[in-house]
Amino acid sequence: MSSVLVISGSPSRTSKTERIGEHVAQRLAAADRSVEHLRVRTLPAEALLGADTRDPAIADATASVAEADGIVLATPTYKAAYSGLLKTFLDLLPQFGFAGKAVLPLATGGTVAHVLAIDYALRPVVHSLGARHAVQSFFLLDKHLSVVGDQLSVHPDSAEPLTDVIEQFTKALDGVPHATVLGRSA
Amino acid sequence: MSSVLVISGSPSRTSKTERIGEHVAQRLAAADRSVEHLRVRTLPAEALLGADTRDPAIADATASVAEADGIVLATPTYKAAYSGLLKTFLDLLPQFGFAGKAVLPLATGGTVAHVLAIDYALRPVVHSLGARHAVQSFFLLDKHLSVVGDQLSVHPDSAEPLTDVIEQFTKALDGVPHATVLGRSA
Amino acid sequence: MSSVLVISGSPSRTSKTERIGEHVAQRLAAADRSVEHLRVRTLPAEALLGADTRDPAIADATASVAEADGIVLATPTYKAAYSGLLKTFLDLLPQFGFAGKAVLPLATGGTVAHVLAIDYALRPVVHSLGARHAVQSFFLLDKHLSVVGDQLSVHPDSAEPLTDVIEQFTKALDGVPHATVLGRSA
Amino acid sequence: MSSVLVISGSPSRTSKTERIGEHVAQRLAAADRSVEHLRVRTLPAEALLGADTRDPAIADATASVAEADGIVLATPTYKAAYSGLLKTFLDLLPQFGFAGKAVLPLATGGTVAHVLAIDYALRPVVHSLGARHAVQSFFLLDKHLSVVGDQLSVHPDSAEPLTDVIEQFTKALDGVPHATVLGRSA
């Protein structure tokens, strides 16, 4: 069973970014993946900003990255790019911390005018970390996400493409190793 | 047998970009892929610049893209980005002209100071074309490429990582569809 | 009197990109600048794609760049970036071909989803050419541009910010040298 | 007298990034500018990561940005981009927090392979903040910076271009407003 770490990088506890991260985590768990959700805002602030990788919570978090087969990145769009908070965590990873992994980049934002930030800003960072397969990214308009009770509701215009990128991601997760397993098992 | 189209985008007939494109084409052919090499500079100039997709040579070239399972892009680095020549051809493709395809982005350049151009400039274009899997890119220093007789020689410092990205690309080519075929055939 | 070269990079003779280039050219001329408009599509195609800088028309065009105090770049947005056609011309310029110059980057496109292409893709190219001052860029929605008779009409939502960037550009044109002249003349 | 805020974004107290920030601050002060140096790592970590703009130290820092005529950004290069730490602070600024300001982007890094990060990653963020004039950026190789006693020594290969960008920045600072003042005073 492949494992996935969702990393959400919003400073706000009530953010739609964190909720979409959790939503994707639950869908992947329902599809028989082992899933963890790391909310970067819950890491100890001083250790994170001071790049103190010996802090136990930081060390746990970077170990979770190392062990995951796949990574989902969920970031709000601030100043035409990913959040600084998300990047403070990525900065702590080893040079090729995403080597061998599949990555799904997700962003939320208030206007489609920021759609390209994810491919122009976040994707190069993902590749500098050595990702094996960063699938097509997806940008979610804030207004397409609403919270009813405890449940996140995704507007139909975003729901279908979201399902599509999640499917691409799970295929990428399975990727070559999964194919080999199939071959062997056949 | 999966098929690959190498697209090289140097204006010069003697360029190292075109030679590395041909070099990769031959290696993929030797690995039992069906390979074509499109040198964009050989397309009819007026039709290319005028975006005349009805021109027979242009139509052939865009059909080759449509039919390929994988695309190798080889570009020189000019003005901190890909060549305009390469982009004139990519501009002619349909909006999601790389959908379902694996892509290997390669660049040549005179200085490592331009390494990031490939991930910051070319990769977002590749993803806007809907590529299924754009593997890790590779930047080749001009001085690592030398021509002896008719043969391209790649400096050992570049030869190993080049072999690695070609291998990643062939794995991506096989990707999910190939795995499915294996599954079915088993 | 400072001089400006408008460079428009659409392959189409009837494009809104070319019209907005001409519109800006006329406004700058009306503000007592010496203005030329280079439509890259009118350059000889073979020479342009072959990077033949000895071709007389190409040589004239690159000389116009060298002599201008300011450059306006007008490009359509294709595949989440500037047009290949525009870039084929920029590729012919000397390494620091924009040194000492003010630059105004303009783009047209069908959706605001491409707004960031101008800052993430075109601006780094402008700076690799050594521009002294690349002012805030502006993205014009196609639907904000309409042609009535021979006249381009700009939708009010775009007209005001366009006026603003033109004003910033003319200030940048005057920049330090103009200030010095004022000082001397005083 | 125009005022400048240097913002350095390294998590380390002994970083060369912070030292080059201080070095530039001193040179600008020596050239009769009013200069402050904000080391982002000294801001309260919880408030910074939680985007708490009511925290007094954060409020002071953002007020310093608002009051400055010019901004120098000094960042280490991590994962092919600016530091997350720097970005956490920029994320707190108002949408057009750099409106009317001149900006000098500086980066340090271990290899020239990261040179383009500053123009492809940081510059679009600077422009999204509405900067009036972001001058040519400069990338300093770590090995070109050495510390002797308390003094930073810049290798001759970097010293001259650094002087040049500082000069461009001071010209940009004076820019149009300064020119106007000269005109009035004449």
Image (cartoon, coloured by chain):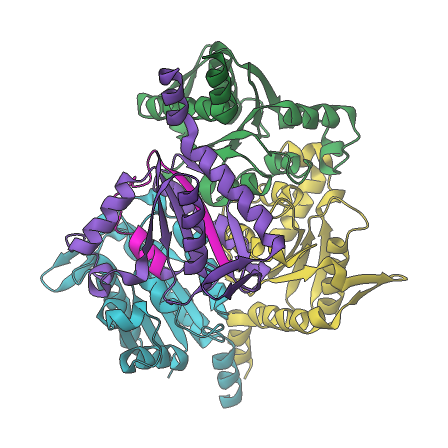
Chain colours: A green, B purple, C cyan, D yellow
- Residue occupying image coordinates x 53% and y 39%: A82
Q: Is residue D96 visible?
A: no
Q: Is residue B110 left or right of residue C69?
A: right
Please report the bounds of the magenta region as a residue range: B85-108
Decide whether residue D105 is among the magenta residues. Answer: no
Percent of width and height locating residue A123: 50, 40
Q: Is residue A41 above or below residue C6?
A: above
In this rendering, the answer to whether D42 lies above or below C73 is above
Specify whether residue C137 is in view. Answer: yes
Residue A168 locus on image (x, y percent): 41, 26
- State which quarter of the image contains the N terminus of chain D: bottom right
Residue drawn 53% across and 83% down?
C180
Whether the magenta-drawn stretch holds residue B95 is answered as yes
> Between B35 and C83, which is closer to the camera in this rendering?
B35
Q: Quadrant of residue B175?
A: top left
- To which quarter of the image does residue C57 belong? bottom left
Q: Is residue D104 above or below residue A171?
A: below
The image quadrant where one finds the C terminus of chain D is bottom right
Position of residue A90 measured from the top left corner of the image (x, y, whole percent): 63, 36
Residue C56, x across and y down, in percent: 28, 83
Considering depth in this image, is D26 or D122 the residue closer to the camera?
D122
A141 on left or right of B151: left
Which residue is found at the position 47% from the left and 45% from the top?
Answer: A120
Q: Quadrant of residue B8?
A: bottom left
**Relative to B50, is A128 on the left or the right?**
right
Seen at 45% across and 72% down, the residue is: C98
**Residue projecting furthest to the bottom:** C185
